[in-house]
Amino acid sequence: MSTGVDQGRSPYTGEWVGSPIPHTTTAELDRVAATAAAAAPALAALPLADRAHLLRSVAGALAANRDAIVELADAETGLGTTRLSGELVRTRVQLEMFADAVTDGSFLDVVIDPPDPDALPAPRPDLRRMLIPLGPVAVFAASNFPLAFSVGGGDTASALAAGCPVVVKAHPSHPGLSALCARIVSAALAEAAAPEGTFAIVFGEHAGRDLVTHPAITAVGFTGSLAGGRALFDLAATRPDPIPFYGELGSLNPTVVTPGALAGHGEQIATGFVGSFLLGTGQFCTKPGMLFLPAEHGLAPALTAAIDQAALGPLLNERIRDRYERSAAELTGTAGVREVVAHRPVADGAGYRSGPTLAAVSAADLRANPQLLEERFGPAALVVEYGSADELVDTIALLPGSLTATLHADPESEGALIRRLIGRFATGAGRVIWDGWPTGVAVTWAMHHGGPWPATTAPLHTSVGVTAIRRFLRPVVYQNVPDAFLPAPLQAANPLGVPRRVNGATAP
Amino acid sequence: MSTGVDQGRSPYTGEWVGSPIPHTTTAELDRVAATAAAAAPALAALPLADRAHLLRSVAGALAANRDAIVELADAETGLGTTRLSGELVRTRVQLEMFADAVTDGSFLDVVIDPPDPDALPAPRPDLRRMLIPLGPVAVFAASNFPLAFSVGGGDTASALAAGCPVVVKAHPSHPGLSALCARIVSAALAEAAAPEGTFAIVFGEHAGRDLVTHPAITAVGFTGSLAGGRALFDLAATRPDPIPFYGELGSLNPTVVTPGALAGHGEQIATGFVGSFLLGTGQFCTKPGMLFLPAEHGLAPALTAAIDQAALGPLLNERIRDRYERSAAELTGTAGVREVVAHRPVADGAGYRSGPTLAAVSAADLRANPQLLEERFGPAALVVEYGSADELVDTIALLPGSLTATLHADPESEGALIRRLIGRFATGAGRVIWDGWPTGVAVTWAMHHGGPWPATTAPLHTSVGVTAIRRFLRPVVYQNVPDAFLPAPLQAANPLGVPRRVNGATAP
């Protein structure tokens, strides 16, 4: 039951874009899920080379439609064509990297233990373990990454690489783009002879909830707000058969500047910080929302100057703009918080623009006001002024889990403090950054984009990088099964040449 | 708040064993959890060789106390000294295997991507990823494995191997043994210079719930019933900060005999099946609870004879005995179910003995009665009689997730059917067994002991084998961090010699 529609609006003007797209009904969703379930065994059974070909086909088709995609993405998100062209390249490169990982085969995590008649407490049978696909995966598209974390984005790429059919829930903020990308992805998969049902898209909040509770769905990938993510996590956890829910929710991304770094290149840090926290109008999950500076830092003029020079695009939609303005007001209205740059709401009616917010607070007042530890989506950040190194470390210890934590320090003179901070960062964040900025997430084998709650709902997993595939795989071990009936990666001859750990040792 | 006590009773006689052990109070539990949290960074920082030494120290101490452990274990569980001696060997071997895995270092899953100025869409920084310990882990001991899945068992071994402090919740059925083993484990850890708080034990159901919701606890390992596991899973999932809950709950462990296997060695299969389902008085999580036989199999006499010859020990405790008898009555009272061997409750008052139950049903009646798809803990099993191969495959498809699925077939004449069944088994079970029996789980690198709901709450993970360590680790990536401030496994010189994947390729 659903009677609503999704329709995009231009963040530049507030005007409607394209035509309304009706929400998916429960009956339609049942059909979509059943088709995905029917596709699962066929997709899982495809040879790895064919599975990699599907990913490359999607990558090529998205790249081939660049102009249409970027134009519609900008109309619905206001992120600008430069950023969106880069995001499309990232989306393509990501799909290609997962295709490489599929043919590499190490993601199968094959472990083989030959029989051992002398094993204790009992003789050991022949055991051959590998990872297999979980089944149909629901992917919730993100407002702030309409390409790289949406229809053909990282969750879809890693689920397909795992061999799982995908059902995308479109984001209501860019429905026209979602429909366009879904048509391109579907056509590319069909052309590459993917099983029917390998990919589908649904629209509407009701369809999203139906998807998370549908018996055919075996896992969920989500990028979005803490409140929305928690609600869907709870649905997944209260199913009769709970399923994994991989949600990336909210992150403060603390950034620490030590006295040594301040003395060495304070002004440069101020400029870098402003560039990072205002990038994409502050709508990155890795936005550095909290800058720890020594008290008496003297950087207010440099920070103000950098903000004055920044060109700020509109926010993604009306709801995000309104929420941002409420959040900025709450921030600057908190006891002990001072404005470094006065927040200037832009109320001229032209789209969803607003002004940046930079506030400051003492570390003591931060500790006294836990509401300051919440993420504020949009161009807002908080400078936290600390006294001693001990106060800095004690305050850092109170922060909730983050995707990233960044350190600017002097390696020559501050070794002991650096070790304390990096140790603390590692327990609270998924990525520890030295002398840089958290915005910009490289898509590589080693990347980890995750972290303890509330950064994510699943601290063991990442939504970026090759290991993101693991979210959608589970192990199976075959005991004494004759070679002819084993999956190819486990057969004695290793016909696919996949890496295998045999008898406890990695084979060359 | 808790005023109860735990005290063991002999399953052979029903008499009390040892002295009552008071339940842990909330205040005591807070202290235990705080101490574990304080130990976490110190334990995580131990060199890998020292961490391995802790595990070996525990292994040696448990083995050195064999006689006292086995005697008390038998008094409280009635599992017999032969089985319990074997279980103690398994517990020791398990700890030693995890020690080997710690020094091997591959469990750290190190991935290193050097900088790449030409990467698309942007130049790539230096990225170095490894796994680090989650933090304090709660371990719920199992009634049916008082050693290998309890105080010093697999969950404890894998959490310590990961570098996580452990707080065990003792099982009320073997509290004296739990206290004895906890003293041995604690002394061995202290002797090996483990940080204080590396290990603790608590008693009482209330303490167990407190543990799952305690802010200091970061993950839970559990082996037990579906109802108990689901209740604790729900507690973990509804925390303000949900944590991973690794529960092994209930499993039917279907076993299929094809016409070819029946013709070839039907009587031998009947004997093997009875030996496996009655092993440990049917109290294994891998008990083959469902045997699929061709209709007109003619094995009733062989099954009956094997059961008549079996020597059956008592059940673990009064509650399990009573639940088993209710469950057996429910089974044989279901429409279409016939008794192969009449269930004979043993009501002479001597301890917790009961008789075995073997019933039979047609595949059609199984499909019509979903309550037959529930695990029945204890010496009960159900023969399912099928007509055609299609009926067999269609019925198998309806089974809930299991830890194991076993096939007896003729590889020469039944290749096509075998492929269909093994494919189906892999999607519904964690271990696929050929021509054997599911009881007996080898502790090796390749072993997987897990499966889809309701076999476990976490289908991606295992509670047996080296990969069980991963449940208690999460990734962190270091970006551009100077070598001197990196953890040893990530440093350029690789001083520990751990296996690493560099730039997408496995280093030799």
Image: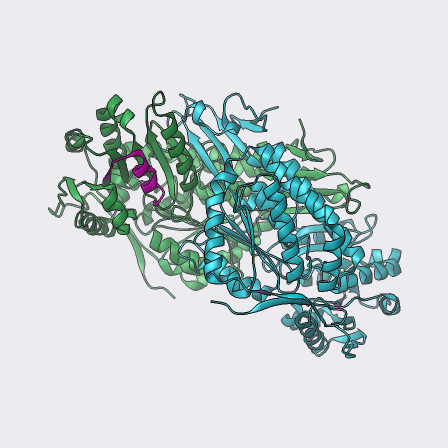
Chain colours: A green, B cyan
Relative to residue A270, is residue A131 drawn left or right? right
Relative to residue B471, is residue A283 drawn left or right? left
Q: Quadrant of residue B225?
A: bottom right
Q: Front-most of A234 and A396?
A: A396
Relative to residue A59, is residue A305 drawn left or right? left
Q: Can residue A47 be found in the magenta stretch?
A: no
- Estimate the x, y position of residue A6 in percent, counting from the top left: 31, 55
Would residue B285 be visible to someone looking at this image?
yes
Q: Quadrant of residue A303?
A: top left
Q: Give the residues drawn in magenta, as a range.
A: A383-399
Q: Front-most of B31 and B392?
A: B31
In this view, B133 is above or below B326: above
- Estimate the x, y position of residue A152 in percent, counting from the top left: 42, 42
Give the residue at x 71% y 77%.
Answer: B329
Q: Quadrant of residue A431?
A: top left
In this view, A270 is above or below B161: above
Q: Quadrant of the C terminus of chain A?
A: top right
Q: Can residue A398 be found in the magenta stretch?
A: yes
